[in-house]
Image (cartoon, grey):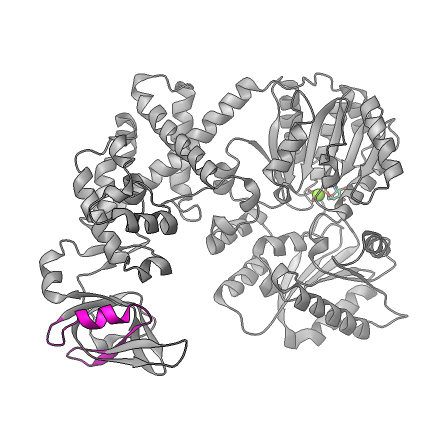
Amino acid sequence: MTDLFQQDIKFLNGVGPKRAELLNKELQIFTFGDLITYYPYKYVDRSKFFSTDEIDSKLAYIQLKGRISNFRQEGGRGRKRLVADFIDEAGSLQLVWFHAAKWIKSSIQPEKSYVVYGKPSIFQGVYNIIHPEIEEAEQYETKVSTSIQGLYNTTEQLKNNYINSRVLQKLLNTLIKKVMGLVHESLPTYLCNKMNLISREEALVNIHFPGSRDLLNKANFRLKFEELFFIQLHLLKQKTIRKEKSNGFVFSEVGKLVNGFYHNYLDFNLTDAQKRVIKEIRQDLGSGKQMNRLLQGDVGSGKTLVALMSILIALDNNYQTCLMAPTEILANQHFDTITKLTNKLDITIRLLKGSTKKSERGIIHKELLDGNLDILIGTHALIEDTVIFKNLGLVIIDEQHRFGVAQRASLWKKNIQPPHMLVMTATPIPRTLAMTLYGDLDVSVIDEMPPGRKPVKTMHFTDSQRNKVFGFLREQIEKGQQIFIVYPLIQESEKMDYKDLEDGYESISRAFPPPKYAVSVVHGKMKPNEKGISMKHFVEGRTHIMVATTVIEVGIDVPRASVMVIESAERFGLSQLHQLRGRVGRGSDQSYCILMSKEKLSGDAQKRLQTMVHTNDGFEISEVDLKLRGPGDMEGTQQSGLALNLKIAKLGQDSQILQLARDQAELILDSDPGLTKNENQVLLQQLKINYHKSMNWGSIS
Ligand code: ADP
Ligand code: MG
């Protein structure tokens, strides 16, 4: 049966070579199988007819019945359109076309009744429907068998070539009739029974042409489950294979350095979460298999210390380590922190950045090869070909969402045997997404903050309340606190953003004049050493306020900074707001995050700012973010290298189904890791089909 699904779409009745080309190009539909999995994006109840006096522009798609007449051209150059009147018993509205005008005019007859279908909008006080779907009422009545009808997304190009939602529905009708009775089942019977799933065929029929609400729900569940299940099955299987195959260095010693550091030089207790995570890492490092672990922990949860302990384990076993950070500022900070923490230990640490001088690089390269360098900290510069280690045993990557998969892999290549890998991220990823994106990594979570931290208080003010905010900032400075003021920076409007920053800096310098106050400024256009000096002044407490673009977003640790002011906060995404807020609240004093915005906000912006005021929990925030934006836009997903390409499931909404799918996949692999049992052959087959397909995709794009 798979053969029929793999048939070229051009062979379907009603398609042909020209339409096939369009479907290929516009919707990536190449085969029967692609078309049958091109699901409606929504459904409408077509048993109801609206009348023209019930309309308002907030309505989604509606259908009306009446006559169409009085065709005319309106509008001038560029905006020419064909307009007609639609009239029913209650009144009238306008129908509007920007394309394909001739064809429509000649096919409509004024004395006939039509069913008109579309989304009403209002233009210059008159209701209209742009590019309505039109069908003769007589035909419509003989044809429609179900009252719930699917709507299909199309593109401009398709519409220009008369392929609208209705045409796709017709093609699907033809296709469904063709494959009826021939659709193979992709899940084993025992699983269908257990999960109460309808058959694949029944699901495919009802997702396109629902027999009832209930059947539509069942079809949805079946297809979502199947989609998520196979992703999980694939990821979990990959993970098992990786673990079997990839031997890792065995770090059996927990020796002098770790113990010495822990007992003699660490001047606070680890949190329980830190202890638990270090234990997980130690087990990996001693297991003989290569570690591939993601460490999630909110900003300020103490990931750096976990990194250091892991590094010391590697050193105790005579391996070199490196720690890679996404920015020079952060690399500097890691270097300073780790150098300070380990100053009583006999180890060599060096810093390598883009701006490192040639002579110093020479020394570093030599020491790396000799094995005299224990810890190399740096930026992207670490992945250059000239950086060769004698025996790299452990790689730590901070803020991993900023590095691509390819970059991660190039660090691997530095050894014959891949080093252990620990990637740390402060961007909390909802469990559902982590499961899917990082399903083949092991995940550790630090879910506890070091003791003595007071949660940051978050407040939202509009621009008109600025004087009040400045007053509050002065009070805080009186108390010896330092302040960040951050301006958004997005690439598309960089110039304007820098103007905002400059204006802001000026007005803040005026409101906080010397000699009483000192203000630093840091932004991406400054040279690295200028930035460094400005940062240093602030870190050392010589300036009260730091005005910055989002360059400070990542990882800066200034315990005395207790106020974060975010300008134009409505322009930031939730995860970014949360990251920025994490820059304060590191000392023992009460900290504040002040969100400044304009008066009028969009619904989404309102929701983002409310969420920030309402919670400090990074995971809760990331769940809201996922719901607002969808996974495609979540930070970290674009670069994760895993194109999800989900056709029906939605990670934001279907987390429960995902969990069910994950559990079942785990259960099955536990009892049959190689999927060799008879009843699981169908799974193996489907995995091959899916996997094969995705390989083809890769080579096409
Ligand atoms: P992260 O990298 O997770 O954002 P850091 O590792 O930079 O967090 O830690 C934030 C601050 O908390 C640092 O100043 C660090 O020294 C301190 N810290 C870390 N762990 C503890 C602990 N167990 N007890 C007290 N302070 C800690
Ligand atoms: Mg950090």
- The magenta-colored residue range is 85-113
| Residue 174 can be seen in this image | yes
Judged left or right of residue 691, residue 303 is right
Q: Residue at x 20, y 43 (%)?
A: 176
Q: Nearer the viewer, residue 88 or 565?
A: 88
Q: Residue at x 75, y 46 (%)?
A: 330
| Residue 371 can be seen in this image | no
Image position of 271 with respect to 45: above or below: above
Residue 544 x, y percent position in the rendering = 82, 62
The extreme bottom residue here reads: 125
Where residue 525 sits, quadrant-wise, is bottom right
Judged left or right of residue 466, residue 86 is left
Confirm whether the magenta stretch covers residue 87.
Answer: yes
Where residue 488 sits, quadrant-wise, is bottom right
Residue 522 x, y percent position in the rendering = 78, 59
Judged left or right of residue 245, residue 218 is left
Image position of 372 with respect to 656: above or below: above
Where residue 310 sits, quadrant-wise, is top right
Residue 379 x, y percent position in the rendering = 74, 41
Residue 282 x, y percent position in the rendering = 66, 24
Q: Nearer the viewer, residue 428 or 499?
A: 499
Q: Tell which quarter ligand 1 is in.
A: top right
Judged left or right of residue 121, residue 559 is right
Q: Nearer the viewer, residue 98 or 390?
A: 98
Confirm whether the magenta stretch covers residue 249.
Answer: no
Q: Residue at x 73, y 25 (%)?
A: 392
Q: Nearer the viewer, residue 514 or 115?
A: 115
